[in-house]
Amino acid sequence: QETYIDSQRERLHLHALHHLLQNKHRIALGSYLRILELCPGDLFALSLAIDVANAIGDSSAAMRAATNVSAYWAERDSGAINYAHPAVNLAAALVSVGLSSRASTAERLAETSLAR
């Protein structure tokens, strides 16, 4: 029996997994970043994007993944989305990991902002 994958998100997850199994990490990372553009609440994609980015030494991609979803999760945590979600703490931790991969850049941006 054939199984059909209906959502673009599911197809992208399968695409990324396929490329990870072939050691094509950059292509897989691109799929995870695309998933996060479409579905910023996908913690599995966020976790894997940061893991793959760190594995290949691409701290810019880890930071991009974190910053792409940080506003979404901040809104959930602040009550703008009107319920507490149990994944908010995990999301905050993953965003922190992604941001810390480029700590010197983040510190420089913070210092520049505070100096204004």
Image (tube, helix red, strand yellow):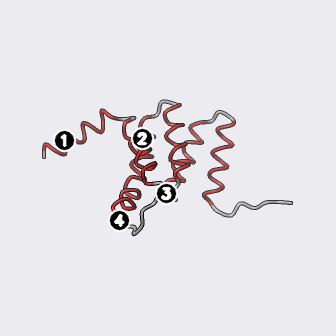
Q: Nearer the viewer, mark 4 or mark 2?
A: 4
Spatial CA span between label 1 and label 3: 30 Å
Residue 62 against residue 5 in the figure, above or below: above
Spatial CA span between label 4 and label 2: 23 Å
Other residues around mark 3 within 10 Å, as few (<14) / some (14–19) / many (≥20):
some
Which amino acid is tagged 4? Gly
The residue that mark 3 highlights is: 41
Spatial CA span between label 2 and label 3: 15 Å
Query: Which type of secondary structure does the marked residue at label 1 adopt?
Result: helix
- Circles 4 and 2, Cβ within 8 Å, touching? The answer is no
Spatial CA span between label 1 and label 2: 20 Å
Percent coordinates x, y for residue 54 in the rendering = 49, 33
Quadrant location of the N terminus in the rendered image? bottom right
Which amino acid is tagged 1? Thr
The residue that mark 4 highlights is: 79
Q: Of label 1 and label 2, which has the lower sequence position?
A: 2
Other residues around mark 1 within 10 Å, as few (<14) / some (14–19) / many (≥20):
few
Q: Of label 4 and label 2, which has the lower sequence position?
A: 4
Q: Which mark is residue 98?
A: 2
Q: Of label 4 and label 3, which has the lower sequence position?
A: 3
1 left or right, relative to 41: right
Which amino acid is tagged 2? Gly
Query: Which type of secondary structure does the marked residue at label 4 adopt?
Result: loop
Q: Which mark is residue 68?
A: none
Other residues around mark 4 within 10 Å, as few (<14) / some (14–19) / many (≥20):
few
Residue 114 against residue 11 in the figure, above or below: above
Percent coordinates x, y for residue 8 in the rendering = 62, 60
Query: Residue 108 appears in which quarter of the rendering?
Result: top left
The residue that mark 1 highlights is: 112
Q: Nearer the viewer, mark 1 or mark 3?
A: 3
Q: Residue at x 64, y 56 (%)?
A: 10
